[in-house]
Amino acid sequence: MSRLLYLAHMARLIDASHALKRLIADHDLTQAEVAEAARVTPVTANRWVNGKQRADSETIYRAIKNLGQDPAEYGIELRKPMDDSGMDSAPAWFLDALAAMEARLEQAAEVRHQALLVAIRSR
């Protein structure tokens, strides 16, 4: 499961990085201008653009809005929490992968349980 979480994390990094690169290219902006719009340091904006650091969706959303652009045009939208824990909602493909993994784990547990019953009965 940690591999799936890692892949989801990397996908979000790539999405944010790609959105910011597109924004900069489309509107001939500098990373410093993006940093100012996001209210962060230029170093932080550089890390976002290069995919070395993840910005939360609210910060990127605010930066794009402050630059007078539509965040949805860049694939950035504010995520609604899944539950009261405040966790970001996960993409459908990720939830599907988790459900499939959970089903396989349940099947494996049932097979182990049946094997244990057979071993106990054969004593």
Image (cartoon, rainbow, N blue to C red):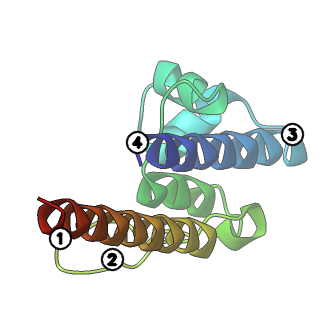
Q: Quadrant of residue 64?
A: bottom right
Q: Which residue is mark 3?
A: 25
Q: Please, is residue 22 above or below residue 119 in the view?
A: above
In the picture provided, is 30 more to the left or to the right than 78? right
Query: Where residue 2 is drawn, which disc sits there?
Result: 4
Q: CA distance from mark 1 to mark 3?
A: 37 Å
Q: Which residue is mark 1?
A: 85
Position of residue 112 measured from the top left corner of the image (x, y, whole percent): 30, 61
| 56 vs 97, nearest the viewer | 97
Q: CA distance from mark 3 to mark 4?
A: 34 Å
Residue at position x 51%, y 48% from top? Answer: 4
Type of amino acid under label 2: Pro
Q: Identify the mark nearer the N-term, 3 or 2.
A: 3
Q: CA distance from mark 3 to mark 2?
A: 31 Å
Q: Residues within 10 Å of mark 1 (few under 14, many from 20)?
A: few
**What is the secondary structure assignment of the residue under circle 3?**
helix
| 105 vs 57, nearest the viewer | 105
